[in-house]
Image: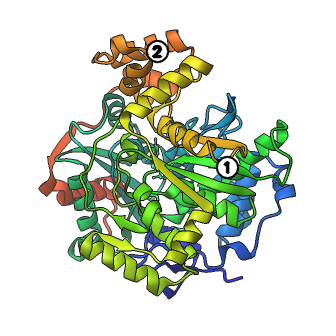
Amino acid sequence: MNKNYTSTRNNSVSISAKEAIKKGFADDKGLFVYPNLGNDQLDLKTILTLDYQSIAKTVLAKLLPDFSQSEINESVDHAYSSTFDSTKITPVVDVDNFHVLELFHGPTSAFKDVGLQLLPQLMKHVLTDNSKVMILTATSGDTGKAALEGFKDLENMGIIVFYPDGGVSKIQKLQMVTTGGHNTRVAAIKGNFDDAQTNVKLIFNDNTLKGQLGSAVSLSSANSINIGRLIPQVVYYFDSYKQLVQNGTVKAGDPVNFTVPTGNFGDVLAGYYAKLLGLPVKKFVVACNENNVLANFFENGVYDRNRPFFQTVAPSMDIQISSNFERLLYYKSGEDSAYVKQLMDDLETTGKYQVSKEVLDAIQADFYCGYSTDQEIEAAIKSVYEKTGYLMDPHTAAGYKVMRDYQKLDDTPMILLSTASPYKFVKAVAAAVLPEEADSDDVLQTMKDLTTKTKAPIPENLQKVWELPVKHESIIQKSEMENYVKEQVEAVFYDKDQSSSN
Ligand SMILES: *Cc1c(COP(=O)(O)O)cnc(C)c1O
C-alpha cells in the first residue's frame, strides 16, 4: 500500500502524513487524501476488544504511517487521558429505539474537542528542531474554544482566534475570553464571520508577511480540512459500534446506520473512512438545517451555493460550502483528481457544479441526505424530551428529524451523533422545553432552571466559566488583523525568552 497522501485535485502529489498535517491543504488548494483507502482494512474482531484509546492508536497507526507507534501512543494518551468527563470518551446512550453517540464530553463540551485535543499532540511530532507554528482560526463559535484548549501552553505553538464581535453566543464568548495559557490570543473583529474568515485566508496567502515572520515560524490552521483533525474522528465510529455489540444491540458484523448533523462534512466523512476501513455500515444519514445545499444536491447532483444564507438555531451547520465533501467526490469518482479539479473550478467561478449520474449513484449508495427547519428542530427537542426525558441540543435535533424521515424506509439499528451539549445553545433549548425563559438574557439562570427541570447535568466547564477572569479584551478592525498577527507572533515566541532570531 502507498504510504503517502495525495491531493484531491492532483494525484501526482505525494506527501507524508506529517507534512500533510503541517501544511493543512495542498498548494493546488486541494485536500490531502489517502489513495486506495479501502485496500487495507482493520480487523474488526480485534477492535471490538479494545478500549477507546487503543482503538485510536490502531486507527492512527493505519492512517498516519510515518508516525512511530510511540509518537502515536504518546499523542493519544495525552489527548484522551483526563480531559474528557466520561471514561468512555464518547459514550453511547440508549434513547427510545435509537442510540445517541455523545461527542460532547471534552473540555469545551463541543464535538470539536475530539479532533482538537489530538491535532496539537500530533503537531508536536511534526515540528522539528526549533520550528514554530502559529495557528490562526476564524470561528463562529465552537471551533475557537476547542482549538484554544487543545493548543494551550504547548511549546513552540501559539494560537490566535478571531471571532465576530457580537456574532457568537454569550457562553461561547465567555469560554474564549477566559482562556488561560501564555500562547493563546483571542480578538473580536468588527465585522461578521465571513469577514474574519476571508481575512484569515488573505493572511495565509500573504507572502510578504511570511517573509517578515521568518523561516522558523509557519502559520497553520485548525480547520477540519486538516487530516490531523479529521482522522481522530474515525475512532468514535468504531468505538460506538463496539458499545452496541457489547450491550447486545447488534451482533459483531451486523450492519448499523449513523445519522450525522453536518456542516463542513468532516464528521460524516470520518464515518465513511471507518466504513472503508471495515466497519459494517449500511447508510449514513446526513442532516442539514435550512442551509440545505447538500440536501438539494442529493436530489439532482447539482451543488449550487447561489442562494440566500440563513442564520439558524443550529449555527455550526450554517454553511454553504462543505469543504470536506470534496474528499468524498474524490473517492466516489474513482479517485479521479482531474474530475474533482474541474468540479471545484466550476464551483469557484460559477458557484455551482454538477456531477455525473454514476458519481451521484455511488454517493447515494452510502448516503441519504435531508434537512430540518428551525421549527422542526424546536419540535424535535420538545417531543424527545417529553417522550423520553432526553435533552438534545439543536444540532442533534436537526439530525433527529432527518433520522426519523429515513427510518420510515429502513429499520437497521441507528446511532445518532450528538455534537454539542444542550447547555451550549441554551436559548434554542429553552424555547423548546422552558418557553417562559426563551427570551431571558440571564443565560446562567436559564441553565440552572433547565437542569432543575430536566435533570440533564450542566457540564462542569460551562458552570465554572462564569467565575473565571476575562483575559482577552481586544476588539480590532478587520484591517488590523494582519498587524495583530505580527505583534502576537513576536510576543508569543520571542518576548518570553528574549531571544530574537530575526
Ligand atoms: C462543527 C459542528 C457540526 C458540523 O460538523 P462538520 O464536521 O463540520 O460537518 C455540527 N454540530 C456542531 C455542534 C458543531 O460544532
Badge 1 crowding class, 10 Å Cα cut-off, few under 14, some 14 to 19, many 20 or more, is many
Badge 2 crowding class, 10 Å Cα cut-off, few under 14, some 14 to 19, many 20 or more, is many
Where is residue 411 shown, x and y percent of the image?
70, 44
- In the image, is 441 to the left or to the right of 45? left
Q: For the residue marked with disc 2, what is the amino acid?
A: Leu
Name the residue located 82 percent from the left edge and 58 percent from the top edge: 44
Q: Is residue 457 visible?
A: no
Name the residue located 67 percent from the left edge and 60 percent from the top edge: 274
Frontmost of labels 1 and 2 is 1
Helix, strand or loop at disc 1?
strand
Where is residue 5 shown, x and y percent of the image?
57, 78
The quadrant of the picture occupied by the C terminus is bottom left
Is the residue indicated by label 2 positioned so its CB lies within 8 Å of ligand 1? no
- In the image, is 184 to the left or to the right of 7? left
Q: Which residue is mark 1?
A: 257
Where is residue 167 shown, x and y percent of the image?
25, 39
Q: Nearer the viewer, residue 48 or 158?
A: 48
The quadrant of the picture occupied by the N terminus is bottom right
Q: Which residue is mark 2?
A: 450
Name the residue located 18 percent from the left edge and 42 percent from the top edge: 475
Q: For the residue marked with disc 1, what is the amino acid?
A: Asn
